[in-house]
């Protein structure tokens, strides 16, 4: 067959450049080359400084095999190779080696032993990499004396494109490996950090047993999860556990507190924006959706999302793609959604504040986390866990022991603020009882998380009440005046000279539960 050398060069180059993925590029190239040069397979090898060869990829008619096998050569094989090369049927033409009877070639025998090969003829093209070890691309057949000088010349014509493409592909592979290692390292550090900080799920074998079973089951699939439960029950903790149990655990878990982000910023926070999309968008920003690519997006307080953001969220979930604000192109996203809420979603749907279609998309696999009062068996373990952890965090280690009736006091209380309230109560007890055993008298009064509106403020000036209670009471007082409104000219944040987000996080931290219906409407 006559071959147009230019065309051959061009087509080999194009197929090699068709993908940065080494295997794909070689597969395409092999199928083109074998139209002109006989070949049952193609192999890419790199020779290490010690003479051993790292066989990287083998392409055959059936497909691609990634080998990454180190093949050791005996020093005798290397010496014999030279003599073998001097035989008349084996030649070197334009830098390409022709081995037409490699079954007697010692190096090929070493290869054959490890790779279980039976090839009979070899055409070997050395490829050059900058700062790398010698490498070869070889074609082989199962018949003897398959290769001619013309074949060698044709293969030698594509030495340069092979060298460049293999070098780029190896660099690309190196970057990918580094990024894989980086992900693994991040995961390892995360687990180490969890261990050091002592963050674990207490009650996983008792009060949360059913929740944990569901979490493990759903982690294996990709379905969206809806975590339902009162504030402070541990929705965050379970969302993290699902991510860690899932095959996405090497990817990021990105949390968005939909209730803490002002309405006008939520779109940009979730979907990102292009430079100049709105006043203040001074540079391009990737949204949380994009950041959660290949991982999990945790939408906390999803019931607080504005209707506009709900429409975009629905689209992103349906089509698995997003558009940055002010952008024109769609960006594919591979993200698993876990949503959480303490609100009654049926109520929100009835009142028209939450889209029913979005709810059905999110509520594929609901998990209800029981309130602490319904799993009181977990209280002793949680209390001991928080005593240890908080004492370390607060530098009050070793902690005081519990007073004789202290555990009964904790067990008798209803914990409206759930696990978060228990953790706050223990922190306060550790601070107040530095030299005495821990007690929890007057839990109802002292707990800032419990109905802060009831804290008596008409106490005499000399009476000391805990600082958090004082702040909670004051925030509730202001919320009453603004009808529960946080933002805007008549909002509580403005009256308190605070940023709305700071106030929101304070409300969350102190677990202030504010009933809007009891508030005075603002004038
Ligand atoms: N089972 C548990 N074991 C250990 N710590 C827990 C457990 N459950 C909750 N916590 C701790 O209690 C606190 C509150 O939990 P978390 O933030 O997960 O609650 P939440 O339900 O997401 O609250 P919110 O609805 O207010 O967002 C966190 O500090 C968390 O680490």
Image: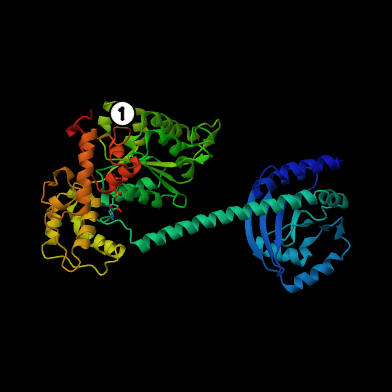
Give residue 301's quadrant in the image.
Answer: top left
Q: Is residue 385 left or right of residue 16?
A: left
Rendered residue at 13%/44% (across/down):
454
Q: Quick check: 378 above or below 476? A: below
Is residue 309 visible to the viewer in this orientation of the structure?
yes
Q: Quick check: 323 above or below 197? A: above
Q: Quick check: 14 above or below 205? A: above
Is residue 34 visible to the viewer in this orientation of the structure?
no
Most distant residue in the front direction: 461
Q: Is residue 358 left or right of residue 78?
A: left
The picture places residue 445, in percent across and down from the top left corner, at 13, 50
Rendered residue at 66%/50% (across/down):
22
Q: Quadrant of the N terminus?
A: top right
Rendered residue at 29%/35% (across/down):
491
Q: Residues within 10 Å of mark 1 (few under 14, many from 20)?
A: some
Rendered residue at 85%/60% (across/down):
90
Element class at badge 1: loop
Q: Quadrant of the C terminus?
A: top left
The picture places residue 493, in percent across and down from the top left corner, at 30, 39
The picture places residue 67, in percent across and down from the top left corner, at 63, 57
Residue that badge 1 annotates: 353
Q: How many marks?
A: 1
**Nearest to the observer: residue 513 or residue 346:** 513
């Amino acid at each position: 067959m006559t071959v147009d050398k230019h065309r051959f060069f061009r087509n080999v180059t194009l197929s090699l450049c068709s993908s940065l993925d080494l295997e794909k590029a070689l597969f395409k190239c092999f199928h083109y080359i074998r139209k002109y040069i006989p070949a049952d397979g193609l192999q890419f090898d790199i020779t290490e400084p010690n003479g051993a060869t790292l066989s990287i990829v083998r392409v055959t008619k059936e497909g691609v095999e990634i080998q990454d096998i180190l093949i050791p050569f005996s020093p005798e094989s290397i010496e014999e190779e030279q003599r073998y090369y001097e035989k008349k049927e084996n030649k070197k033409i334009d830098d390409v080696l022709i081995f037409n009877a490699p079954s007697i070639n010692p190096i090929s025998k070493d290869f054959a032993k490890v790779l279980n090969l039976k090839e009979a003829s070899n055409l070997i093209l050395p490829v050059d990499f900058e700062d790398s070890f010698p490498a070869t691309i070889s074609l082989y057949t199962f018949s003897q004396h398959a290769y001619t000088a013309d074949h060698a010349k044709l293969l030698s014509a594509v030495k340069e494109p092979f060298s460049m493409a293999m070098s780029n592909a190896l660099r690309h592979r190196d970057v990918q490996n580094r990024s894989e290692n980086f992900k693994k390292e991040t995961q390892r550090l995360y687990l180490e950090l969890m261990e050091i900080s002592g963050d674990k799920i207490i009650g996983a074998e008792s009060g949360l047993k059913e929740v944990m079973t569901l979490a493990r089951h759903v982690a294996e699939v990709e379905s969206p999860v809806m975590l339902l439960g009162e504030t402070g029950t541990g929705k965050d903790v379970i969302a993290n556990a699902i991510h860690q149990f899932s095959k996405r655990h090497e990817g990021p878990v990105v949390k968005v507190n939909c209730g803490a982000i002002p309405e006008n910023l939520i779109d940009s926070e979730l979907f990102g924006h292009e430079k100049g999309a709105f006043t203040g968008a001074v540079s391009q920003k990737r949204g949380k959706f994009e950041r959660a690519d290949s991982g999990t997006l945790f939408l906390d307080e999803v019931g607080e999302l504005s209707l506009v953001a709900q429409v975009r969220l629905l689209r992103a979930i349906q089509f698995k793609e997003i558009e940055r604000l002010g952008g024109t192109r769609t960006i594919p996203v591979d993200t698993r959604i876990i949503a959480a809420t303490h609100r009654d979603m049926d109520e929100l749907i009835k009142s028209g504040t939450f889209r029913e279609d979005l709810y059905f998309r999110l509520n594929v696999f609901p998990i209800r986390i029981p309130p602490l009062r319904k799993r009181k068996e977990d209280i002793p373990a949680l209390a001991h866990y928080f005593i240890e952890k908080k004492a370390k965090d607060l530098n009050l280690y070793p902690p005081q022991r519990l007073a004789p009736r202290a555990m009964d006091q904790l067990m008798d209380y209803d914990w409206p603020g759930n696990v978060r309230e228990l953790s706050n109560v223990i922190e306060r007890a550790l601070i107040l009882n530095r030299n005495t055993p821990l007690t929890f008298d007057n839990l109802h009064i002292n707990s800032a998380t419990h109905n802060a509106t009831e804290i008596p403020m008409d106490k005499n000036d000399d009476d000391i009440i805990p600082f958090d209670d004082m702040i909670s009471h004051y925030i509730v007082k202001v919320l009453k005046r603004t009808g529960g409104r946080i933002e805007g000219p008549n909002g509580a944040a403005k009256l308190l000279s605070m940023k709305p987000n700071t106030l929101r996080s304070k409300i969350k931290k102190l677990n202030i539960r504010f009933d809007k219906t009891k508030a005075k409407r603002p004038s």
